[in-house]
Amino acid sequence: MTVFLIAAVIKIVLVVFLLLTGVAYMTWLERKVVGHIQNRWGPTRVGPFGLLQPLADGIKFILKEDMIPDSVHKGLYVLAPALALTMSLISIAVIPFGENINVAGTETPLQITGVAQAVGHPTDINIGLLIILGVTSIGVYGVALAGWSSNSKYALLGSLRASAQMISYELALGLSLIGVMILAGSFSLRHIVDEQSGTWLPFVPHWYIFPQFIAFFIYLMAAFAETNRIPFDLPEAETELVAGYHTEYSSMKFAMFFMAEYVNMITVGCLATLLFFGGWHGPLFGPPLLQSLLPIFWFSAKIFVFMFLYIWIRGTLPRFRYDQLMAFGWKFLLPLAIANIIVTSLIVALKA
Amino acid sequence: MLHQVLFIIFGLICVAGAVNLLIQRHPINSALSLVVVMGALSLIYLLLGAEFVAAVQIIVYAGAVMVLFVFVIMLLNAGAEERSRGSHVALWLGGPGVAVLTGLIVYLMVEHSSKFHDVTIGNLADFGDNTHAVANLLFKDFLLPFEITSILILIAIMGAVVLARREG
C-alpha cells in the first residue's frame, strides 16, 4: 500500500512536470515553425535558438499585474480558468504510456491510474475513454463561465460560440470513437492498445487507422474544433472578438487558459495515438535498456507528429465562417460518423 | 470503511448542492449547483460499482444537458430572481410534504431491505465489466422498449423543432 502510494505520487509529479514542460516547449515550437512557414525567424533572442523563451514568458506571466475588472462576477471569474486547467490536466491520469517498468524491485505500469498485477499485463480503469470524454465535456464550463462572468460583450460572444461549437463537435468526436470501441470491445485504453499489437504482413502494423481511417479523419477534425484551434478557432477570432472568452483575463489567469488549451491538444494527440496508431507499439531492437526505452520513444514521437500537424495546419489554413463551421459539423461529420458506425458494426457482425 | 466515509461525504455534497440550488437567487448559480449534484451522484454510482452509469451520468447530464442550461441562461442574460414570500401553500404543505416523502422512502427501504442484500457500497469486484451487462440488457433483453423509447425521443425532438420554427 505504502509503496503503491509513493509510486503513484512520483508518477503524478513526473507526468505533470513533463506535461507542463511539453506545453511550454509546444509554444516555442509553434512560434518557431509558424515563423518559418511565414518566412520569419520566430524567437531567437532568449538563449540559443530562443530555447529559453518559454521560461521568459512564464516569468512574465507570473510577474504581470493580475487585474480583476470592476463589474465581473468575482467567484465565477476566478473559478473559470482553474476549472479549465484542472479538467484538462485530469484526463492525463488515465492515459497509459507503456507497459510495466521495474524500478528498484517495484513493478509499476507507466500510467497514473494503472495497477501492476503479479502475473501478466498491468490493468487499468475499464472506462478510461469515457472518463476522458466526460472530463473534456466538463471543461466546456471553464470557457462558458469565463465569458459570462467577465461581463463583456466580446467575451460573452466568444464563450457562446465556444460552448455551441464544443457541444456540436463533441457528438462527432464521440461517435467517431465508437468504431474503434466496436473493434476493440472495450473502453479500457490499455486494452485498446494491446489489441493493436502485432502486424498483418511482416510490415503492416495492426493499427486501427487502417480499418477506421474515416473515423480517424472525423476524429481529427472534431478534435481540432474541440481544442479551438485554427481553422476552427472562432471563439477567439481576434479580428472579430478581440480575444474571445479570455478577453478580460490577465497575468496567470490568462496563462491558465493558455495552458489548458495546449494540454488539451496534447491529450487529443495522446488519444489519437492510443486509439488509431497503436500507442507505444513500434519496432524494438538493440540492448535491453534501449528496448525498455523504445516504447516511450515511439509514443512521444507519434504525439510529436500530431503536435506538428496542429502547428502546420495553423500556419496553412484560414478560418471557417461560423455558419460553415456549424454546417460542417452537423451536416457532414455527424452523418459520416453514424454511417461509419453502421458499416463497422455490420462488418463485425458478419465476421462473427 | 473508507467506502462508507466516501459515500457519506459525497452524499452530503449531493444534498448540499441540491439545497443550494433552491436557495440561490441567480439562475446560473442554481445551474452550477445542479452540476455539483450530478457530479456527486456519479461518484456515488462509482462507489456502488456502476462505473458505466457513473461515466454516462457525467457525459450526458453534467457535460451536455447542464451545458445547454448554462448556455441558455447566458444567451437570455437572465438576472437574479426576486425572492417571493407570498405563497402560503408552500409554507403549510412544504414541510409536511417533505416529511411524508422522506418517511415513505425510509419505510420502503427498511421494508424491502432484504432485496438490497447484493448491493453494497464499495463491493466493486462482484460486478465485473458492467458495460457489457448494460449492453446485454439494452440490446438483447429489452431491445423493443429501448427502440420505442429512442423513437419517442426522436419524435419529441422533431416536435421541438417544429414549435421553434413557427416562432421564427
Image (tube, coloured by chain):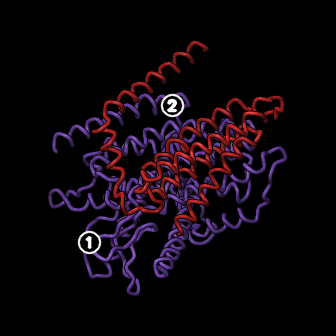
Q: Badge 2: how crowded within 10 Å, few (<14), some, or many (20+)?
A: some
Q: Please state the total of marks drawn on the protein image.
A: 2
Residue A244 seen from this side: no
| Label 2: which secondary element | helix
| Label 1: which secondary element | loop
Query: Residue most toward the bottom?
Result: A104
Residue bearing mark 1: A284
Seen at 63% across and 35% down, the residue is B71
Residue A159 seen from this side: yes
Gap between marks 1 and 2 measured at Cα:
44 Å
Seen at 41% across and 68% down, the residue is A114
Residue bearing mark 2: A326
Specify the chain shown as purple: A
Percent across and percent down for residue A10 are 51, 77
Q: In the image shown, does A169 or B158 lie closer to the viewer? A: B158
Query: Residue most toward the front?
Result: B111
What kind of residue is marked 2? Met
Q: Callout 1: residue from which chain?
A: A
Q: In the image shown, does B110 or B116 lie closer to the viewer? A: B110
What kind of residue is marked 1? Leu
